[in-house]
Image (spheres, rainbow, N blue to C red):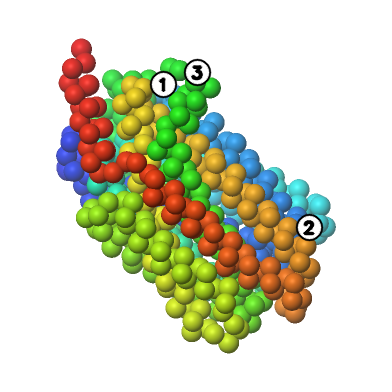
Amino acid sequence: MPSSLPDPADRSPQSPLGFATKLAFGAGDLGTAITANLQVFFLMYFLTSVAGLNPTLAGSVLLVGKMWDAINDPIVGILSDRTRSPWGRRYPWMLWGSLPFGLSFFLLWLVPFQGDWALFAYYSLVAIVFNTAYTTVNLPYTALTTELTQDYDERTSLNSFRFFFSIGGSIFSLILAQIIFAQVQDQALRYVILGGVCAVLSVLPIYWCVWGTKGRTLAIGAPGHPASTSAEVSLPIGQQLRIAFSNRPFLFVIGIYLCSWLGVQITATVIPYFVIYWMGMPEAQMTPVLLGVQGTALIMLFVWSAVSQRVGKKATYFMGMGLWIVAQGGLFFLQPDQVTELYILAVMAGVGVSTAYLIPWSMVPDVIDLDELQTGQRREGIFYGFMVLLQKLGLAAGLFLVGKALDGAGFLTTTAGEAIPQQPDSALMAIRVAIGPVPTLFLILGLVLAYYYPITREVHGEIMLKLRERKENAP
């Protein structure tokens, strides 16, 4: 465990962030990335093909969890903004939420009894508990970005470390799944072991992040610390929300992020069905396809960060999305014998996916700076909370509709140990449409929104200049 002493490079808020601090900050997204990745790629498949739920109920489990997740996001965001402790506003939430986060994730991968409605109730309850714990850990963590640095390009660099661990955690979870699936023959036991190991590995990096970054935030007087001189949020909640949603750039960022992640997560949910049922590949070959996407995204992450420093965030997003749209649309036209082409499209998609990780989250702190200029207050938790709220509401509806579409198309479910069935043509077409045209439309819409996003490097520089002048002139 790293020392809690401040990094020597972090002794003043104007100094560049030290490598150790960036590394510790990035580690904070490792555990949540592992759990989120396994849910996105495997949970729907687990519910329909191991636990035996029909697709509508399985999609409803995801809907219930995400809907509750969307509700608790702004609540935790507002409460963390108002938290005052010797550790600032964010760290107490991360520490208290870590153990329930790991335990509830493990419970998701058990099949404690049989029966559709009993299992639906069980998985819905566990999903509510897990998503509550996930929010108490992850949302305050994401809000740390603005408290660690105010520099336009350094925020992109900081998010590069975050998403290095995020994508790295995703890749690690896929490799671990591949190893466990190859060694364990019992299909249900595979997921129990995978869930248990990843639950433990997901909790530990949270402590690394807290102890590795608190030196910087507390040394510069983090908001929420008793010694901080930062302005406190005192407006009523309703008025705060009206101000947040009157922030025009914030609405663009919400839209860009929502479209990007609908593209990512609908694809990730459907790809196990696409690989196994349409391409006719065995379950063990599913992981290499996923690694093609995530591995490329990891490699490209720091490339795009460097490109962003040269040409700006908007142009970088356009470059990555353009290639991703071509790859995503091409999946619909793949035939079962075109395995090589599948891997090529996976790599092409990974190039674009990395910009979906990097760019929208690098835009949010700039929006928060604009809000501070307009209102005189820092409300990171509100902006992050409502950004994620709308993203999760849209995602919940999207995943529910995927499950509903599969059910309506006659998809055949199985339980652990049963042979893989031959799906009807209607179900195969539903799978192909869900992995190709549907995400492609969302990605195109995201490009349109990015075109109109107004905060460039120059605009942000003017915002920060005015904020500095205000602070210098303040009594």
Q: Amino acid at mark 1?
A: Val
Question: x and y percent of residue 27 in the render?
Answer: 37, 52
**Residue sticking out furthest to the bottom:** 337
Q: Residue at x 33, y 67 (%)?
A: 299
Q: Amino acid at mark 3?
A: Pro
Q: Residue at x 18, y 43 (%)?
A: 16
Q: Nearer the viewer, residue 55 or 285?
A: 55
Label 2 secondary element: loop
Left of 44 or right of it: where is 425?
right
Identify residue for label 2.
113
**Mark 1–mark 2 distance (CA, rounded to whole Å):** 48 Å
Left of 24 or right of it: where is 265?
right
Identify residue for label 1.
233
In this picture, is 167 found above or below 130? below
**Mark 3–mark 1 distance (CA, rounded to whole Å):** 9 Å
Q: Residue at x 31, y 51 (%)?
A: 313
Label 2 environment density (alpha carbons within 10 Å; few <14, some 14–19, many ≥20): few
Question: x and y percent of residue 23 in the render?
Answer: 30, 52
Q: Amino acid at mark 2?
A: Phe
Choose top left, top right, bottom left or bottom right for residue 252.
Answer: top left
Q: Nearer the viewer, residue 468 or 92?
A: 468
Q: Quadrant location of the C terminus?
A: top left
Q: Which mark is residue 236?
A: 3
**Residue sticking out furthest to the top:** 475
Q: Earlier in the sequence, mark 2 or mark 3?
A: 2
